[in-house]
Image: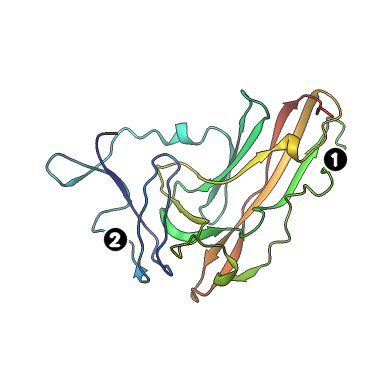
Amino acid sequence: MDSKVTRNSQRPRCSQGRSACISLAVFVFVSLQQICFGADATGLAPGVYKEGTDGKFHPAENVNVNLLWQGVWKDDTNGLRVQMSLITNGSPTLVLIGVGSVRFNSLGAYVGSPNHPVRKCELKDTNGIPIPFIKGKSIEDSLPARLSINTFPRWPNGSLKAHIGFFTNGGPFPLAEIKLKSLYQIPREGDYVLTVCPSIYEFGTNINYLERVDLPCLSTKIHLTPSRN
């Protein structure tokens, strides 16, 4: 990429410490000080910008948002969108979970769960019978409704490891990468239905605590082959 790209936030939020915010489509690291930043933090309207040869930022054009949301996705009433997509051209099959929005930008108002990112992960066969987790491999978590900021893991420089950043035309931020055969003993080849219910955390008026945000559950059909013993 020859030109620099920057993206601006739309929601006013407070952020504690220095945080690295990442877009899935274009990885852009934005350093945030311990301040409350508003809707026009850099003097630019929300969106995607490229730095031109004149040294100024210009709106990026021809961004096809639909190409960034090609999995199974749902919009929540709060404007968040969650997506589940499959990578089946390798071994094992990967399930990718991401979150974002086509209604507002966020440069760090949300943080991923400090442990497992899903409150429910269920695989059923064509008869609706659940496939049990391999012993000790469950990724489901009780996910408390409110957590202290000190609960979330940090990098050596003090920034939050799971700080979430996304943009209206930047696609989903990656939340989880799930290898199904590391979780389930697949008994036979066939079609299965996977249901995943992820959650994230959001900064509130008190930046020392975060509140849980339950994202919509997603289900998709997936063809699996037997696990090797």
Binning the other alpha carbons within 10 Å of mark 2 as few (below 14), some (14 to 19) or many (20 upward) gives some
Q: Nearer the viewer, mark 1 or mark 2?
A: 1
Asked if disc 1 and disc 2 are in contact, CB closer than 8 Å, the reply is no
Residue at which label 1 appears: 130
Q: Residue, x 64% and y 53% (percent of image)?
A: 117
Q: Quadrant of residue 61?
A: top left
Q: Percent x, y for residue 115?
A: 65, 57
Q: Residue, x 63% and y 25% (percent of image)?
A: 90
Front-lying residue, 75 or 117: 117
Q: Is residue 221 placed above or below 29 in the rendered structure?
A: above
Q: Is residue 14 left or right of residue 135?
A: left
Q: Residue, x 49% and y 73% (percent of image)?
A: 207
Q: Residue, x 73% and y 61% (percent of image)?
A: 142
Q: Percent x, y for residue 12?
A: 38, 65
Kindly identify the amino acid type of the residue bearing the numbered disc 2: Asp
Q: Is residue 30 left or right of residue 125?
A: left
- Number of marks in picture: 2
Q: Quadrant of residue 53?
A: top left
Binning the other alpha carbons within 10 Å of mark 1 as few (below 14), some (14 to 19) or many (20 upward) gives some
Q: Percent x, y for residue 112?
A: 57, 56
As drawn, the residue found furthest toward the left would be 54
- Position of the C terminus by quadrant: top right
Q: Is residue 229 placed above or below 158 in the rendered structure?
A: above
* Among the two numbered marks 1 and 2 on one chain, the one whose residue lies closer to the N terminus: 2
Label 2: which secondary element: loop
The colour scheme applied to this rendered structure is: rainbow
Q: Is residue 136 left or right of residue 118?
A: right
Say the numbered circle drawn on residue 103.
Answer: none
Residue at which label 2 appears: 40
Kindly identify the amino acid type of the residue bearing the numbered disc 1: Pro
